[in-house]
Amino acid sequence: MKTRYILQTGAGLVLAAVGIFLRVGGAAVDTALSTLLIVVGTVMVMMGAFNHRRFGDGIESDERTRKIDGAAASWSWFATLILLCALFWANELELIAFDMRGVFAALLFFMVFSAAAFSWCLARREAQE
């Protein structure tokens, strides 16, 4: 197992344990903090295990995948700017009323899913060439 995966899994276990200790120990801490620590720790453990299962001790990326991921991030950023302009004009023309949470949530989900979609499309296009 790569050292990176071991460190990631160990750090995740520590974060989750601290979150559980804060919850069970009755410390005067907001429950949102302990929940956040538990969730982040669990995600780190799961991602470490998933990446180890997926890649093992082999390489995780090469020049081709870095090129595809860079292009996908650029296209996702450009599409997000277009979405921001559309949201701005929809708000200015009073077609839709937005609050900050809604805009941030929409942008976050759009950026994540558009980056994944562009990465998938570019990988397929390069595989066909």
Image: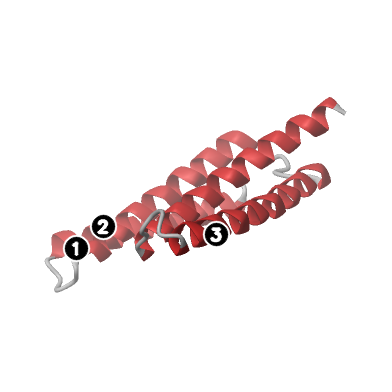
Counting residues from the N terminus, which is met first, the one under dot 3 or under dot 1? 1
* Disc 3 residue crowd, few under 14, some 14–19, many 20+, Cα 10 Å: some
What residue does disc 1 label?
31
Figure check: 70 above or below 60: below
Work out whether 81 lies above or below 114: below
Q: In the structure shown, which secondary structural element does the residue marked by tag 3 occupy?
A: helix
Q: CA distance from mark 1 to mark 2?
A: 6 Å
Q: Residue furthest bottom?
A: 28
Secondary structure of the residue carrying numbered label 2: helix
Q: Nearer the viewer, mark 3 or mark 2?
A: 3
Is 26 located above or below residue 78 in the figure? below
Asked which quadrant contains residue 113, the reply is top right
Binning the other alpha carbons within 10 Å of mark 2 as few (below 14), some (14 to 19) or many (20 upward) gives some
Q: Closest to the observer: 43 or 121?
A: 121
Q: Position of residue 54 (x, y in %)?
A: 60, 35
Secondary structure beneath disc 1? Answer: helix
Q: Amino acid at mark 1?
A: Thr
State the image coordinates of residue 20 (x, y, percent, origin top left). 23, 57
The answer to whether any part of residue 62 appears in the image is yes
Q: CA distance from mark 3 to mark 1?
A: 34 Å
Q: Residue at x 68, y 52 (%)?
A: 73
Closest to the observer, 86 or 24: 86
Q: Which mark is residue 16?
A: none
- Marks 1 and 2 close (CB-CB < 8 Å): yes
Measured in 3D between alpha carbons, the distance from the residue under mark 3 to the one under mark 2, in whole angstroms, is 32 Å
Instruction: Determine the residue positioned at 79% across, 45% down.
Output: 62
Residue to which mark 3 is pinned:
84
- Residue type at mark 2 is Thr
- For the residues bearing labels 3 and 1, Cβ distance under 8 angstroms: no
Residue 86: x and y in percent read 54, 55
